[in-house]
Amino acid sequence: MGVVKETLDLLGLAVLFDFLKDAIERIKRFFIPPRAFSWQTLIYLSIFSWLMSSLAYEGAIRDIIAFFGWVFLIGGTSWYTTDKPLYIPGTVMPVGAVITGGIVSIFAFQQNDQVISRTIVFWPTISALIAAVPEFFEGTGTDVNAQLPKLEDRESVIVLIGCCMLLSCWLNIYEVSDEWMKEYPSARYPIATKKDSQRNDLLTFLRPEDQIPQNGILILNKLQPAVETALRGKSWSNVELWLKNANERVNELGEAVIAIHLAEFEEKDLWKTQANVENIDPEDLNSGYRLDLFSVWDGPSAAPNGYYLQKSCQIEPIAEPVDTLNPQNEKITVAEVECSPKISYFTGKPPNQ
């Protein structure tokens, strides 16, 4: 070693040699346990436990081995991060408690369907509880005695736990609201204009890209062909009879449309369809009818009375020839249906409802 060092001195690389030597010593101290009972031992036991659990058959034995792997990992991480604690600037929260709290959260909710969201929500609270635990004990190593936190430390412990619980509550509000917006996207409407919107320091809702609820549009677009099939080409007398009970008929067709096309949304039970019939020309009863189709939102919204979407269809009688053996052409009156592609958006309740 002395010859190597002298050679490096001649080459001007002695500083590099000292740096590499110091780095190797640091790596050895980090990975090689100074004694049998140390944080490195617990980390190695956790790695060994996970390796054994991966080789074991599925069942209780595998779960027990994996459980001890998590316990060793939590214990080793907590021990290492509390030997020389670092604190988040401006707080009394140790960085080690945050790391350990994250691991505990993953372990606690690993079997949950919402493992990521549950882990993030409970992470601050669990970290605060871990940070507060040392205040209830005194001593080191195996010589530890339970105690109440000192008077000057109690306030900081309470404030730390309270702030972290508040942070968990805010994270949970975000998760719940985000889940609601996915299952009930129509609840974001109607969109407030910049003139009507007011600053809210509690909650801020992002403006959706679409100005009209897409599920309401989908209902009307799928309802239109069903209505056209029920009326087009039918005898005028049967059509007028159908229109007398248009609201009930459209409601039945709408229920089938909603059940099929909104099956993936929880909000499907909050949509309904209605209809309204009026004469095109009130002075001419044979002029035909205007059938207004409504998709009505009965769920929560920014509008006090909710909102609805409207599509209008025009139904007129036309005469069609009938093929018969009679040389004189006979004609019957049937319905012709033409629906406008335009969909209107209104707040409140549909007219005549």
Image (tube, grey):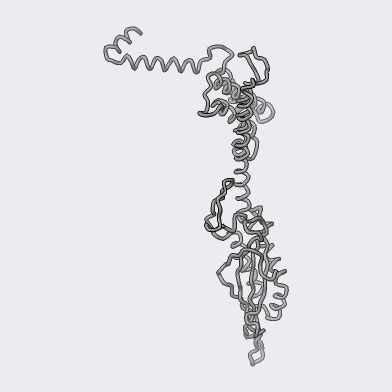
- Which quarter of the rendering shows the N terminus? top left
Q: Is residue 298 above or below residue 206?
A: below
Q: Residue at the far bottom: name it.
A: 328
Q: Nearer the viewer, residue 150 or 219?
A: 150
Q: Residue at the far top: name it.
A: 2
Using the rendered view, name the quadrant where residue 152 is placed: top right
Regarding residue 258, the answer to whether it shows in the image is: no
Q: Position of residue 169 (x, y in %)?
A: 63, 39
Q: Position of residue 8 (x, y in %)?
A: 30, 13
Identify which residue is drawn at 70% across, 81% down: 237
Q: Nearer the viewer, residue 176 or 13?
A: 176
Q: Position of residue 135 (x, y in %)?
A: 63, 21
- Which quarter of the rendering shows the C terminus? bottom right
Count the numbered circles shown.
Answer: 0
Identify which residue is drawn at 54% across, 59% down: 211
Using the rendered view, name the quadrant where residue 147 is placed: top right
Q: Is residue 154 above or below residue 213?
A: above
Q: Residue at the far left: name it.
A: 10
Q: Is residue 347 above or below residue 104?
A: below
Q: Position of residue 306 (x, y in %)?
A: 65, 60
Regarding residue 85, the answer to whether it shows in the image is: yes
Using the rendered view, name the quadrant where residue 257 is placed: bottom right
Left or right, 168 with reference to 88: right
